[in-house]
Amino acid sequence: GETIPIKTVTWQVGEEKQLGELLEKVDILIINHGINVHGQRTEDAISQSYQVNTFSCWRLLELFLSTVKTNADIAKKEVWVNTSEAEVGPALSPLYELSKRTLGDLITLRRLDAPCVIRKLILGPFKSNLNPIGVLSPNWVAKQVIKLAQGDVRNIIVTINPLTFIAFPIKEFWVSTYFKLFSRKPADLTTTILNRH
């Protein structure tokens, strides 16, 4: 294949708003950052895990969704979020699992009213800086993700664990159904508040 240069931008957790202007020009935002504190359970490890794995991703998602303003944006803009296989299975790192599961649930909730496509990437243990002992080739995983996205799959599962292919769709169905039944669209909430006054 052809090598395409990629613009690299440095940013910090907590300062995601500084990326707003850049995200206006982005068609597909891939959120794939994370931290793994392994077996730690200190106050700092808890805070760091949630700030990086959950809330930073959430802020980036919301910032990107705010750039979806026209029909053309709705048609071409997408968010791909690597929530991890930890949404439904052990990652041998409790804080990684907890923070990624929280992110996964927030993404499921947000997809109910999102102005554009949000895809979840549920990826098995691929080799990376975060997971140097991963068994899957990152290039193979990337090819599978692209192939499934081209087929308009919204929950992209690439793993060697057959249980994930069963557990994730069941979990996603029930969590999504629960959120639909017990939460309201922003417009419905505004109407309810206005009716009370």
Image (spheres, helix red, strand yellow):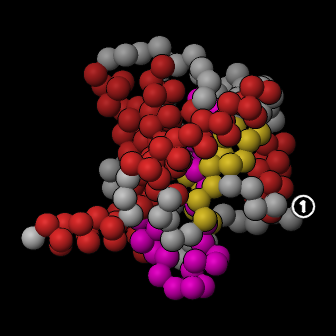
Give the quadrant of the C terminus.
bottom left
Furthest residue to the right? 1
Residue at point 41% right, 32% down? Answer: 49
In this rendering, position of residue 49 left or right of residue 136: left
Q: Nearer the viewer, residue 137 or 7?
A: 137
In this rendering, position of residue 20 left or right of residue 133: left
Above or below, comparing residue 6 to residue 45 in the picture: below
Q: Residue 138, how many percent across, how many down? A: 77, 40
Say which element carries label 1.
Answer: loop
Q: Quadrant of residue 129?
A: top right
Residue at point 43% right, 41% down? Answer: 54
Please check the rendered image and state whether residue 178 is part of the magenta-colored stretch, yes or no.
no
Q: Residue 17, how many percent across, how many down? A: 35, 63
Q: Residue 56, how many percent across, how many down? A: 40, 48
Magenta stretch: give its range.
63-86
Kindly tell me whether residue 23 is visible in this rendering.
no
Residue at point 63% right, 55% down? Answer: 119
In this rendering, position of residue 136 left or right of residue 119: right
Q: Which residue is mark 1?
A: 1
Kindly tell me whether residue 59 is visible in this rendering.
yes
Query: Looking at numbered disc 1 in the image, what kind of residue is underneath it?
Result: Gly
Is disc 1 surrounded by few (<14), some (14 to 19) or many (20+) residues within 10 Å? few
Residue at point 50% right, 34% down? Answer: 101
